[in-house]
Image: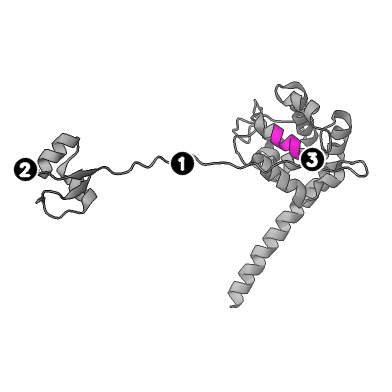
Amino acid sequence: MKKIFILCLFLLTGIIAKAQDTEDYIAEHVKYAQELMRDHKIPTSLILAVAIHESASGNSRIAQHLNNHFGVKGPNNNDEIHSSYRDYLNADESYSHFVEIMETRAPFNNLFEKYDQYDYKGWARGIQRYGYAHSRTWASQVIALVKKYELYQYDERPEGYEEPVYATPVYHRKKRSTKTAKAYTVKSGDNLSVIAKKKGTTVKAIMKKNGLKKVNLKPGQKIKL
């Protein structure tokens, strides 16, 4: 019982420590993210949430070794890590480059006309829609981070601002086509070999599908093919 209690305490402490890490990460980068928002009109909350998501709050290998906080691919000169992700001099340079990508690369640059600097949901969904990440739940995860850490408080929203309402996207899985098994009525003179040859199958397959233990058939009997 004591061991279980210690284990639970250890796990709980790990969760709290991880949450505190994220809070520390926000505190470290929020000021620069706000400067980018004021200069480029992109939500601070969105910038921080994407960085938290892509860098695991600064704990990912590419964040630690390459100062890459947004999962941007490109060449690097780092000898400590072999990676397809580009490197930066510091975290601020990575933040600035993310905003530069949004501003200069099509179709991301279209988002500035569609969404204001307070609409983190619109930005997240637009960035996903234009192919920044392959995951279909990427935007939902980024939005969830904004809400969890209340990052919208850093967006300097005007008094009385109301968030646009967006329908929750629903992802439909493709339904597997289900073919109905064809029934065959046994005629006089039929046997499994004859039927299998006619229908392009095997005796073994017919017996397995119908649960037959003997090869004998009776006229009028229905079997699945």
Q: Quadrant of the C terminus?
A: top left
Q: Position of residue 10 (x, y in %)?
A: 65, 65
Element at label 1 = loop
Count numbered badges in the picture.
3
Direction from residue 115 to residue 182 in the image, left or right: left
Q: Which circle, 2 or 3, is nearer the viewer?
A: 2
> Which quadrant of the view contains residue 102?
top right
Q: Which residue is at a point 15% across and 43% down the rendered structure image?
A: 203
- Mark positioned earlier in the residue sequence (1 or 2): 1
Q: Which mark is residue 175?
A: 1
Q: Amino acid at mark 1?
A: Lys
Q: Which residues are magenta?
A: 120-126
- Of all residues shown, which one is farthest toward the right? 159
> Which quadrant of the view contains residue 1?
bottom right
Q: Which is the main secondary structure of the residues drawn in magenta?
A: helix
Direction from residue 189 to residue 184 in the image, left or right: right
Q: Amino acid at mark 3?
A: Pro
Q: Which residue is at a point 63% across and 71% down the rendered structure image?
A: 6
Q: Is residue 81 magenta?
A: no
Label 2 Cα crowd, 10 Å radius (few <14 / some 14-19 / many 20+): few
In the rendered image, the vertical position of residue 76 relative to residue 215, given as above or below: above
- Residue beneath label 2, please? 189
Q: Amino acid at mark 2?
A: Gly
Q: CA distance from mark 2 to mark 3?
A: 73 Å
- Mark positioned earlier in the residue sequence (3 or 1): 3
Q: Position of residue 158 (x, y in %)?
A: 92, 41
Element at label 3 = loop
Residue nearer the viewer, 62 or 208: 208
